[in-house]
Image (cartoon, helix red, strand yellow):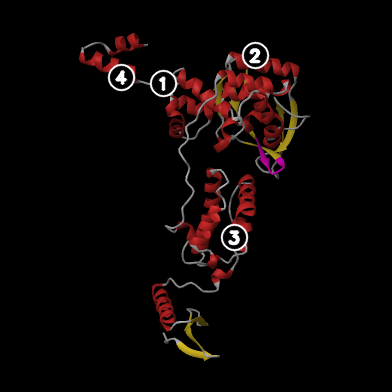
Amino acid sequence: MAAPERRERNGKVRWYARYRDPEGRQRSKTFDRKVDAQAFLDDVSSDMRRGRYIDVDAGKVSLRDYSAQWLSAQTFSETTYSLVEQRLRLHVYPRLGDRQLRQLTPSVIQAWLKGLSDLAPKYQKDIFGHLSAILTAAVDDEKITKNPCKAQSVKRPKLEPRKVVPWTRDQVVAVRDALPDQYQIMATLAAGLGLRQGEVFGLSPDDIDFLRGTVTIRRQVKLFVKNKAFAPPKAGRTREIPLPSTVRDALAAHLAAHPAQTVTLPWKTLGGEAVPVSLVVTRHGEAMGRNWVNSYLWGPALDKAEVPRGRDNGMHALRHFYASVLLDAGENIKALSSYLGHADPGFTLRTYTHLMPSSTERTRQAIDGALKGQDPASTSETGS
């Protein structure tokens, strides 16, 4: 590869690093110092020999344009697509969207991250993950040589370990009673069956077997920006849950006072087949949506019950209450995981292990019994 060329203009000396790329095209870059131009040519020559050369013009595409291309190629569900697009539009494009990929240095990424400090840690982590995935694709597409998000100088958002603190029975009752009469059943279903919010919205009387005392969770209501659709439960896991008598009686009373109404929504996607379903809870004959419920029902109910608003006190708190009650009663993790619809019992264990009753005394008695030659069964009975 040729040596740098010296050029002088208006008394200023510049050094031109000229070379031909693997396609035979003439390329050049200008430097103030000869040593820098030579180092650049040496790097280019080395990259070409190793097959790692990247066109200097490849990284000139803006992050916004490349992200749009990346997003359109993903196989996300409509919900995930909308979510990722919204996060990029609100939190990535305003600061970074017009920058070229090659301009996204680790220091630029770190400065952008600092601007996200007011957001919740998990939200920061998710947004950062989206950007990193995009830049990893840019590396694979040979637009840039490295993903700046993976540089050691970039302090990635981290989640502080958080332990679930379940509500008390009094809090559950207070919030339930603070809801309008026709919507109190939502709190009963979440706390008494451990349902997710969308599963509460998607429950049908046809899913309830009053004679056997079971409820089958077959669907949820998913929100796509402002439109809704029926969809399978999370991870597509249909499940059967025991129906406690208190929940059974509350359901019967609710349906007598507020008969179920049939709602027709597309299945899985907004373009899916229209499916009519009779729903336990509706609003003016329409399926419930989380945004309206959280803003106009749940938030005011928290205020009235004097429970602080916040991410820990959404409707999901009732699901945690359900888990804590079952664990305190001695239910095993595998059964609880099944009732909650978790794909992995290990996740259930990691989430709720601190709520499990202490086995300290049982351990003492078991070892004492073994060393004394007692029957383990009699030891267990003594400690029960």
For residue 205, the mark is none
- Residue drawn where x is 46% and y is 19% of the image: 328
Mark 2 vs 1, N-terminal side: 2
| Residue at the image point whose x is 62% and y is 23% from the top | 189
Amino acid type at mark 2: Asp
What residue is shown with label 3? 96
Q: Nearer the viewer, residue 359 or 229?
A: 359
Q: Examine the rendering and report whether any part of residue 137 can be seen.
A: no
Task: Give the label on residue 363, or none.
Answer: 4
C-alpha distance separating marks 4 and 3: 57 Å
| Res 357 label | 1
Asked if disc 4 and disc 1 are in contact, CB closer than 8 Å, the reply is no
Q: Earlier in the sequence, mark 2 or mark 3?
A: 3
What separation in Å lies between label 2 and label 1 (alpha carbons)? 30 Å
Q: Is residue 309 or residue 266 the one in the foreground?
A: 309
Question: Residue 251 at x, y = what percent?
Answer: 66, 18
If you read the primary sequence from the N terminus, does the residue marked by circle 3 or circle 1 appear first?
3
Res 359 → quadrant:
top left
The quarter in which the N terminus is drawn is bottom left
For residue 249, which numbered disc appears in the image?
2
Where is residue 219? Give x, y as percent: 63, 32
The amino acid type of the residue labelled 3 equals: Leu
- Which residues are the magenta region? 221-227
Mark with earlier residue (4, 3) = 3
Q: Quadrant of the C terminus?
A: top left
